[in-house]
């Protein structure tokens, strides 16, 4: 009895894995013939430490953003009704004001001035444009522009008096803290992710100086940190989506 020959496994055929697609954005660019997505989608790529073109900045997770939104809502509610959290905040502030020399706390507070923070962000935006990351620079600038658009209405709505100026109103939230956070973190993400710890230190020093000098209550600073986190998250998400829509460049034959 003649033995049935075994079926030979299919042999890979050359030039079948990829095909040149007519009408593609770049002639001669290989495309997958089976239409499957690559193993690592472009939107899931992790940024490299130097923030080179094509990389995306890290975005906080949804639990972190939800926690920041809840904290901002609770703190704002307590300030509006002058609840127990706001009263505790005032007692803590009175025990902290002027515990360090005023000159030192004022220098720390000045890190949140527009004249200090904005030039830092502007230089980082120029660097990003030079490296070809125009969309990232644009969204960083829009994030900075959104700070007064969000902070000023909150100040008018809450009308919270200041620690050393009870006759004045409009201290909640802290505009200096939000400016420092968005400017320094935005600059760090545009230049190099390794600068993020530096941005965190500068933001913390700014908020601490504002509290120790008596320019703001601690809850004013906390609310601005939550607001800044939300602004940076939206900016990073917009940058990621813009990067994922950017077509891959084609290189000609050498």
Image: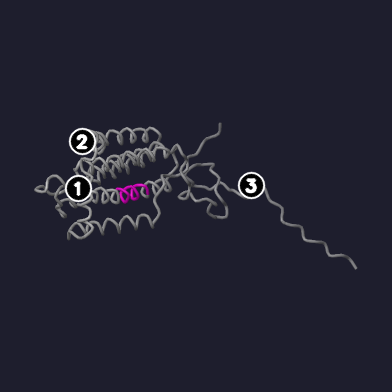
- Mark 3 falls on what kind of element? loop
Q: Which mark is residue 102?
A: 2
Within 10 Å of disc 3 (Cα), the crowding (few <14, some 14-19, many 20+) is few
Which residues are the magenta region? 228-236
Relative horizontal placement of residue 126, taking residue 21 as reference (left or right): left
Asked if the residue at tag 1 contacts the one at tag 2, i.e. Cβ–Cβ closer than 8 Å, the answer is no
Q: Quadrant of the C terminus?
A: top right
Relative horizontal placement of residue 151, taking residue 4 as reference (left or right): left
Instruction: Name the N-terminal-most of marks 1 and 3.
Output: 3
State whether residue 169 is above or below residue 2.
above
Query: Residue 233 in magenta?
Result: yes
Query: Residue 33 appears at what percent x and percent y?
Result: 57, 52
Identify which residue is drawn at 47% across, 46% down.
46
Q: Quadrant of residue 72?
A: bottom left
Q: Quadrant of the N terminus?
A: bottom right
Query: Residue 191 appears at what percent x and percent y?
Result: 39, 36
Query: Residue 174 appears at what percent x and percent y?
Result: 22, 46
Identify which residue is drawn at 84% across, 65% down.
4
What's the magenta bit mostly, secondary-structure-wise?
helix
Query: Residue 13 in magenta?
Result: no
Instruction: Tell us which disc is closer to us: 1 or 3.
Output: 1
Q: Which mark is residue 15?
A: 3
Q: 247 or 229: which is nearer to us?
A: 229
- Mark 2 falls on what kind of element? helix
Q: Which mark is residue 94?
A: 1
Spatial CA span between label 2 and label 1 = 15 Å
Q: Quadrant of residue 182?
A: top left
Q: 29 or 194: which is nearer to us?
A: 194
Instruction: Name the N-terminal-most of marks 3 and 2.
Output: 3
């Amino acid at each position: 009895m003649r033995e049935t020959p075994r079926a030979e496994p299919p042999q890979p055929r050359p030039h079948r894995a990829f095909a040149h697609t007519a009408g593609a954005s770049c002639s001669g660019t290989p495309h997958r013939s089976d239409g499957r997505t690559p193993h690592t989608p472009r939107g899931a790529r992790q940024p490299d430490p130097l923030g080179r073109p094509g990389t995306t900045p890290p975005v906080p997770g949804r639990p972190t953003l939800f926690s920041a939104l809840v904290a901002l809502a609770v703190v704002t509610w307590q300030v509006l009704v002058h609840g127990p959290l706001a009263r505790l905040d005032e007692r803590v502030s009175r025990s902290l004001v002027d515990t360090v020399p005023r000159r030192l706390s004022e220098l720390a507070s000045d890190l949140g001035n527009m004249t200090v923070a904005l030039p830092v962000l502007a230089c980082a935006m120029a660097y990003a444009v030079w490296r070809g990351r125009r969309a990232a620079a644009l969204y960083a600038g829009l994030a900075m522009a959104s700070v007064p658009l969000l902070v000023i209405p909150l100040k008018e709505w809450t009308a919270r008096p200041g620690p050393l100026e009870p006759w004045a109103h409009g201290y909640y939230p802290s505009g200096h803290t939000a400016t420092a956070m968005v400017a320094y973190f935005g600059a760090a993400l545009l230049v190099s992710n390794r600068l993020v710890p530096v941005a965190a230190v500068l933001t913390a020093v700014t908020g601490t100086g504002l509290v120790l000098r008596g320019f703001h209550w601690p809850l004013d600073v906390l609310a601005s940190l939550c607001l800044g986190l939300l602004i940076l998250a939206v900016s990073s998400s917009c940058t990621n989506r813009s990067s994922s829509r950017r077509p891959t460049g084609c290189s000609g034959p050498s």
